[in-house]
Image: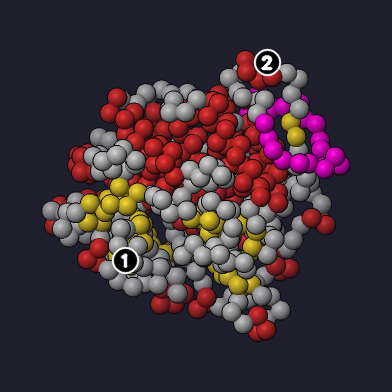
């Protein structure tokens, strides 16, 4: 069963701004959103539990060293340079006014980290978040239902991957939605004065369309719409690693996704003498890559915390990279990354589609000559395993890969010739900020345990009304193996 969100925007009415400020919260923030009178409900304000969680966001138990703070400042400068003043949205790559929903999620988590690390004050945080949420609420939606895969960050228009206007849109990505839902949940918990506004934005999205039978589904417009009553082809998204992470993002908003959260179908593989699980669905049988990279496990660790199974899986993925170094002398920390040359985006993997250390495009085209040592992967493994000698070597190799003007950290270094991969992205710099915030909080995952008996998740679920619930059968798409997506 798919669980719907409330379709009304609830407004928190507080007795006085003085009370809010006494709690260290900016409750008197301007929110440029119009709400019909009939949808307004008055609430007493956040519960003691919600206030305690918000206060915990600022609890810095292991302050950054001067060097770490300088690193955080450089990473934040990327967003200072790439935030569009007209919209508050940020560029996915330096000076390129286009971004996916995943990229905007990176900015949100970076902004939250920047606030608690002292890189921005409350006034600047409110200014940026207000403008961002206002733009997010105004984005044109694909089929008036869900955010498009890509937007122009200057105009908020739906575009294609070349940043050309797309009136119809490219469809939606359930994985990107999962990332954004996790980021929005972090913000509504750490800044509860924004909770109703954020929940109102999410309520506008028809998330039910991206959930079928406990799994995540993206949407692609059909080229020939006469072939089906449904002009949108819905395709299952996610493979082991990213699928579970995105599903947890949905779970924070009351969605039940047992199949997406299950590691099955999976199989054991051995790389460099290290065994770990990979998704049993390969590109050959599903046209979707079952790549194993570092990023999904790092995100899971710093936001949700690993359970016993994921902890073992992640450690083995890290161990395989360490063993490659010991066997070849080549420092290895692989993940998905933009690169500063064609084909511009690659998955440098531990394993993909039957091949260890595959370097591939989304279309499974091979580019092993362009494998990179990933800055964000090296940072992530170091702060997850700071006592590990190999993790320390990784960190030493990337800690100075910053732009000369201090405008951010480069994505990494090419393995073949040691040259720097001189592209600046929100993905790299956003994850660096989130990792440093995790460190400053004493390596405490921000959302650890919240999916168990969680108050906010419960309040986001609709009342038990059969008229507002949609069964999997009612929304079941036409699924064929050849159209399954990552």
> Which type of secondary structure does the marked residue at label 2 adopt?
helix
56 sits to left or right of 463 = left
Residue 484 higher or lower than 34, as above or below: below
Q: Residue at x 69, y 75 (%)?
A: 230
Classify 10 Å Cα crowding around label 2: few (below 14), some (14-19), many (20 and above).
some
Task: Name the residue tied to disc 2.
Answer: 18
Task: Name the residue tied to disc 1.
Answer: 342
Q: Residue at x 44, y 45 (%)?
A: 82
238 sits to left or right of 129 = left
Residue 264 seen anywhere in this rendered image of the structure: no
Q: Main secondary structure of the magenta part?
A: loop
**Where does the image place residue 359, in percent across and percent down from the top left?**
30, 65
Chain-order first, disc 1 or disc 2 = 2
Magenta-colored span: 30-50
Q: Residue at x 63, y 31 (%)?
A: 192
Mark-to-mark CA distance, 1 and 2: 55 Å
């Amino acid at each position: 069963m798919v669980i719907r969100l409330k379709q009304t925007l609830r407004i928190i009415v507080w007795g006085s701004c003085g009370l809010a400020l006494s709690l260290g919260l900016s409750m008197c923030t301007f929110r440029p959103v119009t709400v019909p009178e009939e949808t307004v409900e008055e609430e007493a304000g956040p519960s003691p539990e919600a206030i305690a969680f918000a206060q915990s966001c600022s609890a810095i138990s292991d302050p950054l060293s001067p060097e770490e703070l300088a690193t955080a400042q450089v990473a934040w400068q990327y967003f200072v340079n790439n935030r569009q003043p007209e919209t508050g949205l940020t560029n996915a790559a330096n000076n390129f006014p286009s971004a996916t929903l995943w990229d905007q999620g990176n900015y949100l988590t970076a902004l939250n980290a920047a606030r608690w690390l002292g890189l921005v004050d409350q006034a600047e945080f409110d200014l940026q978040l207000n403008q961002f949420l206002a733009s997010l609420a105004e984005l044109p939606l694909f089929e008036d239902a869900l955010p498009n895969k890509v937007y122009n960050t200057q105009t908020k228009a739906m575009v294609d991957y070349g940043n050309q206007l797309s009136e119809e849109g490219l469809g939606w990505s359930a994985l990107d939605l999962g990332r954004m839902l996790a980021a929005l949940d972090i913000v509504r918990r750490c800044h509860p004065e924004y909770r109703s506004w954020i929940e109102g934005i999410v309520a506008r999205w028809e998330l039910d369309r991206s959930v079928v039978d406990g799994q995540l589904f993206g949407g692609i417009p059909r080229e020939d719409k006469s072939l089906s009553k449904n002009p949108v082809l819905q395709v299952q998204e996610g493979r082991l690693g990213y699928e579970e992470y995105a599903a947890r993002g949905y779970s924070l908003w009351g969605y039940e996704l047992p199949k997406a959260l299950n590691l099955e179908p999976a199989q054991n593989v051995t790389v460099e003498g290290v065994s770990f699980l990979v998704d049993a669905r390969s590109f050959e049988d599903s046209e979707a890559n079952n790549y194993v990279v570092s990023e999904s496990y790092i995100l899971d660790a710093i936001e949700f915390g690993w359970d016993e199974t994921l902890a073992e899986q992640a450690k083995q993925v890290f161990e395989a990279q360490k063993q490659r170094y010991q066997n070849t002398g080549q420092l290895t920390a692989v993940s998905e990354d933009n690169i500063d040359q064609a084909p511009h985006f690659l998955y440098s993997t531990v394993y993909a589609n039957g091949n260890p250390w595959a370097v591939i495009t989304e279309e499974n085209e091979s580019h092993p000559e362009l494998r990179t040592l990933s800055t964000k992967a090296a940072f992530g493994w170091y702060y997850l395993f700071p006592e590990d000698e190999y993790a320390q070597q990784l960190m030493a190799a990337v800690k100075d890969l910053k732009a000369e003007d201090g405008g951010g950290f480069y994505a990494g270094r090419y393995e073949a010739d040691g040259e720097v991969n001189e592209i600046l992205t929100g993905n790299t710099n956003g994850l660096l900020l989130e990792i440093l915030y995790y460190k400053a909080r004493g390596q405490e995952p921000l959302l650890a345990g919240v999916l168990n008996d969680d108050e906010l998740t419960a309040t986001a679920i609709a009342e038990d009304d059969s008229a507002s619930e949609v069964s999997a059968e009612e929304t079941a798409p036409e699924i064929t193996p050849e159209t399954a997506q990552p």
